[in-house]
Image (cartoon, grey):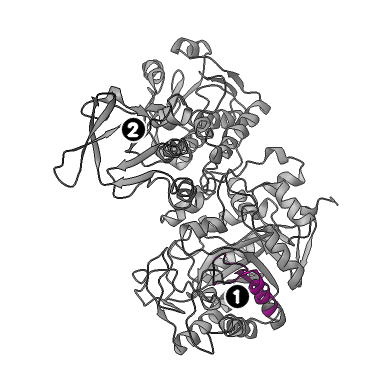
Amino acid sequence: MSNDPLLQPFHLKHLTLRNRIMTTSHEPAYGDDGMPKDRYRLYHLERAKAGVAMVMTAGSASVSRDSPPVFSNLLVWKDEVVPWMKRLTDDCHAAGAAVMIQLSHLGRRTRWDKGDWLPVISSSHEREPAHRATPKPAEDWDIARIIRDYVDAAERMKAAGVDGIEFLCHGHLLDQFMSPLTNVLDAPYGGSLENRARLALEMVAAVRKRVGNHIILGMRYGVDEMEPGGIDIEEGVAIGKIFRDSGLVDYLNINRSRIHTDPAMTDLIPIQGMRSAPHLDFAGRIRAEVGMPTLHAARIPDVATARHAVATGQVDMVGMTRAHMADPHIVRKIVEGRENDIRPCVGATYCLDRIYQGGMALCIHNPSTGREQTMPHDIAAAAVKKKVVVVGAGPAGLEAARVAAERGHTVVVFEAAGQPGGQIRLTAQSKRRAEMIGIIDWRQAQCVAKGVEFRFNTWAEASDVLAEKPDVVVIATGGMPLTDILAAGNELVVSSWDIISGDVKPGANVLLYDDAGDHSALQAAQVIAEAGSKVEVMTRDRSFAPEVMAMNLVPYMRAMQDKAVTFTVTYRLLAVEKAGNQLQATVGSDYMKLDKTAIYDQVVVNAGTLPLADIYFELKPLSGNKGAVDYEAMIDGRAQPDVEGFQLYRIGDAVEARNTHAAIYDALRLVRTV
């Protein structure tokens, strides 16, 4: 048996877990009408088959009708959930993994205009900033009803065969009762810590009575709210001891911070550029002082950090949830001695940000995650070996080369620059986003290991491509910044890329006009602000940076709010002209006829990219398919039609301005059937 701490079994009550790695409960929003149907099941099954010890589903499943989902949570108040959950459980058990589900009542962490439009309840009238509902304090009949709902939901999950149930306290109704920041009730549910914890204890006692002892029950709660007047570490330890002394709870899962605002949530679940495993020591303190089995997950992105967490006794089980979204085969690769092949989590948190905007969780650079039905993680070998030429070594081109090489094809990549990366390399110049280069480094290493030939510092011409006698040509040349958007003065502006790259130094008083709403604008604004300049970020939209999304916005705001930065929405830059040694900007609006002016030293435009695709159009008439893509075949996972001559495709920003995930997804689903 391996002496790797991560690969040692762990005994949790009567349950033997095959190693120390789990995926903690999270909601990928793959449910269908609140049910964990095939997409949901196959997502978890992929991780179970690859060796994870336990899959914890839901994040969290709703126990009551007045706890309506805000991002496609499972509905365990419905009897019909049982057969769906049982199939997931049976399949994961067959693969050797234990299965748990997380149950919760959201309390104020929802909205009254979701689901059945029922009143939102909590332990005070104070609304949660993130969801904006003003709740009513729970009455006695609400409390009795909700406890019954928890018990009925737990019984359904027992019928589904789960090994255990985790109750999410943190930020949800149970925690709203426990926190002095959100509980204004009188006794018996308000006041002292014992009173504030009463709802959680009465609920778990009722559940234990219904489901018996042969099912694991755990509590995931916040040990430190990191806010004056809230639960602090001493009270967090005391809560753990209350759970322990009840004899009803089998383990603790440790969180820290609050989740009522985007900044608080980001402190709980740090993104790239923030500390790895920032709350691990708090989990270790709870384990040491409370003496219960302790689980924890919060930005544990790599095997080394996870191994340290277990080896030093901080935790008994370590959660690597986002890491498994990037690579569901982590455990298998550890066992096989292939840790260098693990696709890294780069902390982009595209997954969570999509959920909080109402979408499904997607990994920024593993498009198979959540698409296991149609886009398997393993690449099948091709029956016929071909010559594949890729032009461009950004994320799209590298993915095309990697997948083609996995298929067994001979692959040549042309790249004009001296190293791979494309726009990702520009992004990674910002220190906080340096981890993004992992998207490139991993693919480059995979390509080199599979014999891909790279020709750097080579501006490929059509003749260069044709000289390779290719069967397939993939154009992944990306795009160049679009700045020609004004009625006049386009020659007077610079692009956000110019600022980020350092090719242009910031002026003293800068207008940054953002017509794309993406990271480039805020990265450039941060560079300008940190240079000591004044910067106004202007957009015609009703909110700024909509493509950056909630959690990724937090570090930008923390970097800029104490500097000379202002944000102006609903205004449109029309034109720029010289005004002595300065620039005069003419500003209008889409809402009314407006024509005002302001003076700046520098105007920066961020308006996305235009495809850099000349070589595609040169090759198009010479190709067998004339560049055409059979969309039905691509979506269905079938090969593109055979043609006389070579097949020609273009992907990523060489088609149109999108994002990194879209570029990599383009490459994967086109090339995986070549």
Q: Which residue is rendered at x = 46% and y = 10% of the image?
A: 463
Q: Helix, strand or loop at disc 2? A: strand
Residue located beneath label 2 in the image: 605
632 to the left or right of 268: left
The kind of residue on which mark 2 rests is Val
Vertical relation: 450 (above or below) 110: above
Vertical relation: 429 (above or below) 131: above
Q: Helix, strand or loop at disc 1? A: helix
Q: Nearer the viewer, mark 2 or mark 1?
A: 2
Q: Quadrant of residue 136?
A: bottom left
Outermost residue on the left side: it is 593
Q: Quadrant of residue 164?
A: bottom right
Q: Position of residue 256 (x, y in %)?
A: 60, 63
Q: How many marks?
A: 2
Q: Position of residue 533 (x, y in %)?
A: 41, 36
Q: Position of residue 160 (x, y in %)?
A: 59, 71
Q: Nearer the viewer, residue 594 or 266?
A: 594
Q: Quadrant of residue 632?
A: top left
Tell me if mark 1 has few (under 14), some (14-19) or many (20+) residues whose alpha carbon lies within 10 angstroms of its own: some
416 to the left or right of 210: left
Q: Which of the two labelled residues, at mark 2 and mark 1, occupies the earlier sequence position?
A: 1
The kind of residue on which mark 1 rests is Ala
Q: Nearer the viewer, residue 499 or 654?
A: 499
Q: Is residue 527 magenta?
A: no
Q: Which residue is rendered at x = 47% and y = 79% of the image?
A: 123
Tell me if mark 2 has few (under 14), some (14-19) or many (20+) residues whose alpha carbon lies within 10 angstroms of its own: many
Residue located beneath label 1 in the image: 159
Write the start and end of the magenta stretch as one range: 215-242
Q: Are marks 2 and 1 in contact (CB under 8 Å)?
A: no
